[in-house]
Image: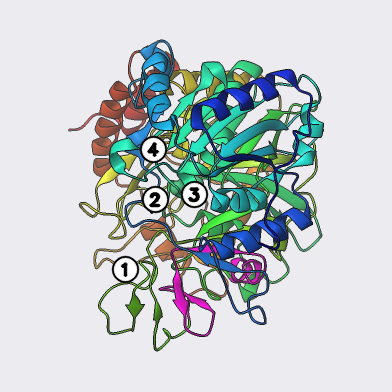
Amino acid sequence: MSGAIVMNPAPTTHPALLAWVAEMQALCRPERVVWCDGSEAENEALLRQAVAQGDLEPLDPQRWPGCYSARSAENDVARTENLTYICTRLRRDAGPLNNWMDPAEAYRKLGGWLDGAMRGRTMYVVPFVMGIPGSAFAKVGVQLTDSLYVVLNMRIMTRMGSVALRELGGSGSFTRGVHARADLSLERRAICHFPEDNTIWSVGSNYGGNVLLGKKCLALRIASWLGRHEGWMAEHMLIMGVEDPRGQVSYLAAAFPSQCGKTNLAMLVPPPALSGYKVWTVGDDIAWLRPGPDGRLYALNPEAGIFGVAPGTSHLTNPNAMAAVRRNTIFTNVLRTDDGGVWWEGMGTPPPLAGTDWRGRRWTPGSGVKGAHPNSRFTAPARQCPSISPEWEDPAGVPLSAIVFGGRRARLEPLVYQARDWRHGVYVGATMASETTAAATGQVGVVRRDPMAMLPFCGYDMGDYLRHWLDMGGRLSRPPAIFHVNWFRQDAQGRYLWPGYGDNLRVLNWILARAEGRVAGRQTPVGTVPETGELDLEGTSIDQRTLRSGLLDIDPDEWRAELDDQAAWLERIGPTLPPELRQEHRAAVERFGRRD
Ligand code: OXD
Ligand code: MN
């Protein structure tokens, strides 16, 4: 077959890498082994092969140049958190909030599933760098996979191929990632992390978050462990720069649980009234944070691509993402239109008259089912995003003025407040929460706590993680100021009080003004909120009175109940919870005074 990949010799002499690949080859027994170099020629050949074997379908090359669509199995459309494990020798090191498996048992169990799992298939060896090669922020991983879909997505999401082998040299350390699709059954699916061995084994899935091992598995779970031991942090945060009309750019990082609009915020377009401002996207999902020589905290996006949720992404909600996905993008589980395009619910264009839905069935607007899966995705090169920051590949990272936590709360949480100091900010992050939406199965409006949005991604015990946060603050002479936002507050009739999207820039501007000491704010028992007039509302339908009595209102009774709930949550974190955070809780209770 023309364009078929031929077996190639190992392009490295790294003894540990060669020995491990040989060991895994003996276990998985692929028909052939292909080392990926990341070149354009290789990409073209792999794409041709993926189309030939039915893994990808090309879109119309005129309207969607270099774009493809893919479908995953119906039982394999999202991260399976219940099948995701941290495998440390001591259960205590994974902590009570992670699924734990004994490493020996995990190797035995998954080793059984991997035994011969690649028979008749190709094992691709995918070396990749998370972070910027040559910088303090670089980590090398090597993923073995029998999925061409994974190779092609890894090529977009990471800096992949020869660049990684150069970074590794003859003896560097690397994360060992093994992925096999196996039979895609839930009974034989697990994503196991062995932080003590710098190893990840993922079997039985072909869905992004479970199998693009550079992303959640390495850049968050393994990296959070490495960061704790090496004095840095791996966080589930977007990174963005805000350029003011004088041309000064300030950076912030923000953590929100899923479904709170992280990608949209990272790519925000200023509303007309703030057209003198510009937002620069540095990253939309993961931030690696390190203290700099000047005592500030520096942030770098370790990824090279965007793996974004398609439904709800439109020219209205996120024009930058829409522009980013017009070329060289892989769409997964969206609707395919008959003329070689793609469509999803909330794309902002009328549905096509007919197409093929994410399950591969004929679809019309009257079918009564969604055309795109609610978790359908696009994988696009980050550099294609029109708002990508000129600094996004700066090997030093960008200095943070602020860290923002947030969640979706219909009541209670004000639009924005500033934590009193770093320690209080860690408390705010540790207790942050979001309410479930109709998009997820289960009850609507249930409050879920998700410390720093890391609950599914922390590679070790949560109490130890919070300890690390507290310790890192002590190493920064100029720490970023910490804030909490809530874009989702509603009135008694269930109407959103804040317009969101581009108008969120108004809040970011106040945050940066506060962080840089340009406004005083108003003290409340929760933290510092904007004083009347400090938050620019010009061009909105909101007046300062509504802001104060609605969006910034703090109801002491609701907050006392919230603090009781936060106390119960702190207990769940377990015995390693830093005592400073219990003290922060007591101080917050005192600020609200006793119930009468
Ligand atoms: C993601 C997630 O895919 O957080 O980024 O689930
Ligand atoms: Mn994420």
Q: CA distance from mark 4 to mark 3?
A: 22 Å
* Left or right of residue 491: residue 12: right
Q: CA distance from mark 1 to mark 3?
A: 35 Å
> What residue does disc 2 label?
78
**Between residues 294 and 207, which one lies in front from this camera angle?**
207
**Mark 4 falls on what kind of element?**
loop
Examine the rendered structure and indicate whether residue 103 appears above or below residue 47: above
- Magenta segment boundaries in residue numbering: 319-348
Label 4 amino acid? Asp
Residue sitting farthest toward the top:
90
**Mark 1 falls on what kind of element?**
loop
Q: Dot 2: within a 10 Å radius of its alpha carbon, few (fewer than 14), some, or many (20 or more) residues?
A: some
> What residue does disc 3 label?
208
Residue sitting farthest toward the left:
596
Please report contact status of discs 2 and 3: CB closer than 8 Å, yes or no.
no
**Circle number at residue 450:** 4
**Is there any visible trace of residue 72 in the rendered image?**
yes
Which of label 1 and label 2 is nearer to you? 2
- Which residue is at 74% across, 59% downward? 244
Examine the rendered structure and indicate whether residue 247 appears above or below residue 9: below
Which of label 4 and label 3 is nearer to you? 3
Queried on whether the Cβ of the residue with tag 2 lies below 8 angstroms from ligand 1, the answer reads yes
Q: If you read the primary sequence from the N terminus, does the residue marked by circle 4 or circle 2 appear first?
A: 2
The magenta stretch spans residue 324: yes
Q: CA distance from mark 1 to mark 2?
A: 30 Å
